[in-house]
Image (tube, grey):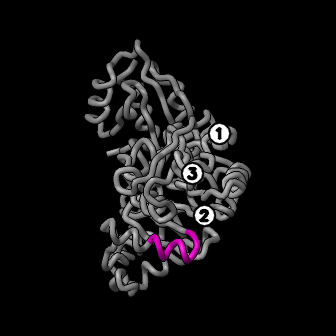
Amino acid sequence: MIDLRSDTVTHPTPAMREAMANVIVGDDVYGEDPTVNKLEQDAADVFGKEAGLFVASGTQGNLVSLMTHCQRGDEIIVGDQAHIFKYEQGGSASLGGIMPHIIPVQPDGTLAFEDIEHAIRGNNIHFPRTRLVAIENTQGTLGGLPLSPQYMQDIADLAHKHGLILHVDGARIFNASTHFNVPVADMVTDADSVTFCLSKGLCAPVGSIIVGSKEFIAEARRVRKVLGGGMRQVGVLAAAGLIALHDMTKRLQVDHDNAHYLAESLSEVPGVDVMSSATNFVFFLLKEDAKLSPAEFVTEMKSRKIILSPYPGFERKFRCVMHYWIDRERIDTVVTNMKAILS
């Protein structure tokens, strides 16, 4: 099967499987798993932070971070297209008692500084306390849009100017650093906390990492525990995570180039309009006058061992995400089959 729905569909590489089979493990709740300890510290070093914490998912990483930074009744400023707001089931509110203050995400994936400043609450007993600004890089909902190192520094400066915390949902932050050809640490120099995903495009089967100060991570470890995230011999997963962190992050330009190649190739397919291509994402629209309906298109492609699905909430909008298991030959196979069923 050729699965283009997301870079979360990747499975471990042969090197990961070998490392997982031979890993040395211990009990991580006791702090005794040497492999996860190494992964956490290596991740912190790569990001220029003091400490790291392995969590089960990006959603858990964001929730742990917000609940560590904020008290019940605090307010966070977050974009209306942010993963934290749209796709995490309101966990920060339902579990953390944290209220989101929603502002528009701009077409380039950024939050406008004037919108952030307008959203900051004054010192009034009637208001919740504004505690934190959350930014997503790359911005997935709008198409994997990378936010520049300068913007990331400027938003950190703005948050700290107003005494606020900056949390970065960096699920695909390595795609942003690849796009700008800078070390990932330069993307988040003054961020107070960052989450990044090991299983989105980096092929690890499970896991994300939170990085920040030693004090923050110590508290985050407590929050992770109460959320049921204290795992035991997690080195089995961390072994794959180490390869994801040190090796798979260095090949992401291939995915970006393949996304550009796919976008160019789709321009030759009847009934299809390419909407955008950025980092490892391609969005296309199945036209109203296309030969097949969206449901028929999905069924026919699946019969040809190609998995696509409409983007949530959009009947005719499709997202294709490049990853390690998608090469030029497979892209050509996809385009050839699309031409065959839509011509």
User: Which amino acid type is shown beneath numbered disc 3?
Assistant: Thr
Of helix, strand and loop, which mostly describes the magenta segment? helix
Location of residue 167 in the rendering, given as x and y in whole percent from the top left corner: 56, 57
Viewer-proximal residue, 273 or 334?
Answer: 273
Dot 2 falls on a residue whose secondary structure is loop
Which disc, if any, is residue 118? 1
Real-space Cα distance between discs 2 and 1? 22 Å
Specify the segment rendered in magenta.
212-220
Viewer-proximal residue, 156 or 237?
Answer: 156
* 300 up-or-down from 1: above or below: above
Dot 1 falls on a residue whose secondary structure is helix
Dot 3 falls on a residue whose secondary structure is strand
Closer to the chain start, of discs 1 and 3, is 1
Closer to the chain start, of discs 2 and 1, is 1
Residue at image point 37% right, 52% down:
91
Viewer-proximal residue, 328 or 312?
Answer: 312
Question: Position of 121 compared to 207: left or right?
Answer: right
- Name the quarter where the N terminus is drawn: top left
Residue at image point 53% right, 46% down:
127
Is residue 203 among the parts visible in the rendering?
no
Q: How many residues crowd around disc 3 within 10 Å: few (fewer than 14), some, or many (20 or more)?
A: many
The answer to if 218 sits in the magenta stretch is yes
Residue at image point 29% right, 25% down:
295
Viewer-proximal residue, 222 or 108?
Answer: 222
* 269 up-or-down from 79: above or below: above
Which disc, if any, is residue 16? none
- Name the quarter where the C terminus is drawn: top left
Which disc, if any, is residue 130? 3
> What residue sits right under mark 2 in the picture?
192
